[in-house]
Image: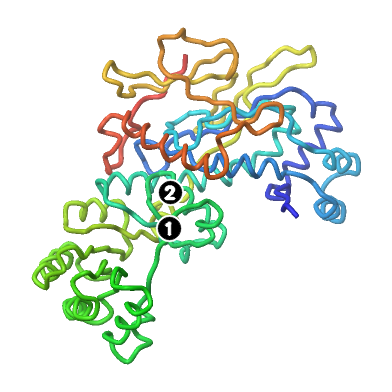
């Protein structure tokens, strides 16, 4: 049985539908937008992640007997609204930035065109998925660039919720990580998995040598041996003695890493293990990865930092009504005017402009007919960004499953190559390109 996602939402969304049905405004054609007013953590760009997961969740957004019984027992809405919810199927259109795309302040990452009642119910679901996944992907993208082409593995499952860990592995993979330690992420999304042994395995045995012998016997000489349980230099010597010079890799999880890594590489070479790789872990983030990128490290394992967005666990996205039709069928732009929380009303389309050398220089947001309508700004204003994700309630192909992840991963690689160099700065600063409304 497919698990319903209908109650992954906030109470007030259902009471708004209840009141709107009573007032006769629930079926007004409306446009909602999901966007971030600013880039949290003063990042230079954001990365869209979670779109595929959201589309899959919308397909399962159904009020079955179990959900309806809960709402009825707790008197969340009236019986009339319960009857409406029982038949709920999203039947509108959704346009958005495709997964793996980069974004900036004000970018309408998701545009939902539906009746007010259909659209407002998706607010919490959309925000909870995209806020978390995009935060992970943004951090992962910065780490992947800092690694300068060296592979990174996501190893943060123990530092977040059990389901969040799977989503984080997916987001990190889209943004440039090469593997995960999480087996469910491997099963669900086809992400390569990796892992060998922890310190407890070494401590289980009577000596480090016995632990290494047991691991090599089971996994072969190409395994990765953890060499810092006791003394690192002695651990390296023992590892080579046990596995031979064809030892696959050693892992270092402690110490002054730049100094330790240099000494371990020297020692491995002296022992004849010139092809043995070095992987490092130990609470890495984009800054420590950058500091180690020029050292003889061969790969990185990142845990806590990537799954919590490297200190920015949410992108601060919001979901706002920006337009609706009146009783006569005329479109009315609406916007919140609160201080520091203002939004820009109206239906919008988006283009990204480029220099003659193909480097992005502005995010152009046009007020007009919206996505799928008549093109604003002419044909010489850059590349269209928004793509159809759902049309008449049907999820469009290419955005979900393994194919969607592969496309998102390649899309992200291409988009990073189009950003100006300042985008890759790890210092706090303004967005890499400005957002302009036209």
CB atoms of marks 2 and 1 within 8 Å: yes
Q: Is residue 133 above or below residue 233?
A: above
Quadrant hosting residue 20: top right
Residue toward you, 308 or 430: 308
Label 2 Cα neighbours within 10 Å, binned few <14 / some 14-19 / many ≥20: many
Mark 2 vs 1, N-terminal side: 2
Q: CA distance from mark 2 to mark 1?
A: 8 Å
Q: Is residue 337 above or below residue 220?
A: above
Give the residue displayed 57% in from the left and 10% down from the top.
Answer: 374
State the colouring used for the structure image: rainbow
The residue at which mark 1 appears reads as 180
Farthest residue to the top: give it: 378
Give the residue displayed 67% in from the left and 39% down from the top.
Answer: 122
Farthest residue to the right: give it: 79
Residue toward you, 353 or 428: 353
Q: Position of residue 421 (x, y in %)?
A: 25, 32
Give the residue displayed 34% in from the left and 34% down from the top.
Answer: 416
Quadrant hosting residue 288: bottom left
Q: Secondary structure at mark 1?
A: strand
Query: Would residue 405 appear left or right of 253 to someone viewing this image?
Result: right
Quarter of the image containing the N terminus? Answer: bottom right
Query: Would residue 287 appear left or right of 21 to someone viewing this image?
Result: left
The residue at which mark 2 appears reads as 173
């Amino acid at each position: 049985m497919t698990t319903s996602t209908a109650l992954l939402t906030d109470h007030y969304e259902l009471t708004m539908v209840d009141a709107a049905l009573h007032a006769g405004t629930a079926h007004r054609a409306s446009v909602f937008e999901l966007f971030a007013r600013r880039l949290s953590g003063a990042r230079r760009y954001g990365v869209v992640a979670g779109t595929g997961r959201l589309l899959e969740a919308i397909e399962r957004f159904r009020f079955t007997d179990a959900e309806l019984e809960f709402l009825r027992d707790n008197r969340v809405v009236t019986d009339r609204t319960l009857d409406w919810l029982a038949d709920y199927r999203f039947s509108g259109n959704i346009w958005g930035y495709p997964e793996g795309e980069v974004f900036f302040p004000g970018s309408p990452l998701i545009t939902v065109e539906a009746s007010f009642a259909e659209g407002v119910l998706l607010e919490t679901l959309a925000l909870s998925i995209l806020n978390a996944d995009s935060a992970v992907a943004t951090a992962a993208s910065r780490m992947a660039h800092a690694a300068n082409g060296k592979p990174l593995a996501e190893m943060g499952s123990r530092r977040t919720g059990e389901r969040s860990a799977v989503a984080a592995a997916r987001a990190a993979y889209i943004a440039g990580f090469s593997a995960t330690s999480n087996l469910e992420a491997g099963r669900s999304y086809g992400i390569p998995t990796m892992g060998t042994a922890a310190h407890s395995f070494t401590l289980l045995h009577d000596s480090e040598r016995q632990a290494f012998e047991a691991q090599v016997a089971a996994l072969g000489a190409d395994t990765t041996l953890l060499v810092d349980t006791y003394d690192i230099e002695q651990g390296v010597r023992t590892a080579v003695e046990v596995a031979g010079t064809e030892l696959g890799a050693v892992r270092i999880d402690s110490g002054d890493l730049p100094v330790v890594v240099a000494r371990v590489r020297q020692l491995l070479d002296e022992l004849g293990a010139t092809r043995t790789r070095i992987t490092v872990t130990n609470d890495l983030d984009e800054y420590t990865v950058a500091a180690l990128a020029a050292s003889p490290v061969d790969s990185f394992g990142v845990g806590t930092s990537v799954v919590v967005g490297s200190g920015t666990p949410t992108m601060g996205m919001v979901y706002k009504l920006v337009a609706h039709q009146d009783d006569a069928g005329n479109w009315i732009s609406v916007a919140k005017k609160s201080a520091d929380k203002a939004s820009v009303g109206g239906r919008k389309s988006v283009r990204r402009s480029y220099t003659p050398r193909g480097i992005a220089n502005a995010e152009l947001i046009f007020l007009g007919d919206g996505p799928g309508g008549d093109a604003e700004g002419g044909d010489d204003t850059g590349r269209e960004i928004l793509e159809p994700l759902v049309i008449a309630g049907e999820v469009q192909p290419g955005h979900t499953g393994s194919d969607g992840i592969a496309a998102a991963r390649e899309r992200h690689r291409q988009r990073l190559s189009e950003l100006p160099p300042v985008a890759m700065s790890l210092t706090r600063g303004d967005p890499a390109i400005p957002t302009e409304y036209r």
